[in-house]
Amino acid sequence: MANTSRYHQTLSFEVFPPKKEDEFKAAYDVLNELSKLKPAFISVTYGAGGSRSKKTIDIASYIQNTLHIDALAHMTCVGSKREDIIQVCEALKAVKVNKVLALRGDRPRDMTDEQFNARDFAHASDMIGFLKENTDMEIAGACYPEKHPESFSLEADLQYLKQKQDMGANMFISQMFFDNDYFYRFRDKALQKGITLPIHAGIMPITAAKQLGTTITLSGSSVPKSLADLIAKYGDNAEDMRKAGIDYCVRQILDLKQTGVDGIHIYSMNKPKTTAEIVNAIQ
Ligand code: FAD
């Protein structure tokens, strides 16, 4: 039985920054809509390689200063030297953003071996230690209920997760998962390893069949039969699939809330309508 006393059950969202300069207006419209749902914080992704870090900072600034919602800016070791990390932190502090999600990042397709190996921090925990010593940022880390795809075992992955806590992280956000049992097992094992930080459950609404071949495959998360059946049944009809996907996601969140969860972090995919339907159904 979960100890519910430590759970705050915050609601938060992830957004991605626009790719092009002329897409900022649309991104702000998305954020304006999401802000009406009163999330505790909104996180902003970062392109590993750092080429679009300015866009992450601009979007985080809008969240923090225009919407007055806490912004959590992602940053990656991949593509970054120590001085780049310091520069990004200074730029974030200049716009009053003091929360970062410290990630290793994955290798972008167009990155050479040399560029990939040139990073100063091999793993997220190394960057977390550096941030803790050299900045006053609040630091979050990523975790993986079904283990990280490169990891030898969940045990090994949890050992490295504990390092993130020891190096100064103050909360974790999980990779998406579609079967809550993985999350519950992971959380119990994490606690056994002494991982006591809040773990926010990352929830991705599957509202289009094509997400199976893209987002889900990349994440390494497994697809339970109930979700596969739903995609097989509704996948050809966009609106039916959207409704069925929202319904699946709502049931997943309600179960998590009932069992006690530190927070629900919805991967919004910059879709405020879908996010609002989910949020309204879980209140
Ligand atoms: P790490 O913690 O460094 O772990 C990576 C692998 O190395 C794991 O297998 C781990 O077990 C192993 N490991 C860790 N420490 C050690 C060690 N000391 N010695 C040996 N092995 C070790 N990517 C982006 O590019 N941009 C984003 O904005 C972004 N946002 C994300 C948000 C969330 C919530 C999540 C869950 C992932 C996100 N990612 C993002 C993807 C992430 O960058 C990848 O999953 C990446 O492969 C791992 O990042 P990490 O921070 O978990 O790495």
Image (cartoon, rainbow, N blue to C red):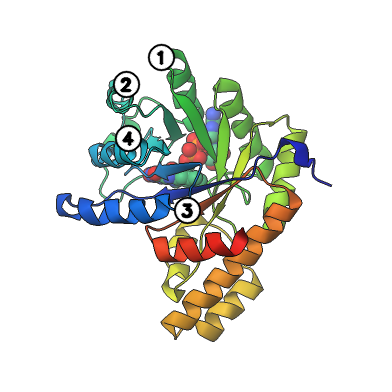
> Disc 3 residue type?
Leu
Q: Secondary structure at mark 3?
A: loop
Of circles 1 and 3, the one toward us is 3
Where's residue 213, x and y in %? 44, 69
Task: Tell whether 96 sits left or right of 41.
Answer: left
How far apart marks 3 and 2 lie (CA) works out to 33 Å
- Residue 179 visible (yes or no): no
Query: Is 274 positioned to the left or the right of 65 in the image?
Result: right
Q: Contact (CB < 8 A) between labels 3 and 4? A: no
Residue at left offset 76%, top offset 37%: 5
Label 4, label 2: how far apart the Cα atoms are? 21 Å
The three-letter code of the residue at mark 1 reads Asn
Residue 78 placed where, x, y %?
A: 35, 36
Q: Is mark 3 within 8 Å of ligand 1?
A: no
**Where residue 65 is drawn, which disc sits there?**
4
Q: Which residue is mark 3?
A: 37
Q: Is mark 1 within 8 Å of ligand 1?
A: no
As measured in the structure, the alpha-carbon distance from the residue carrying label 3 to the one carrying label 4 is 17 Å
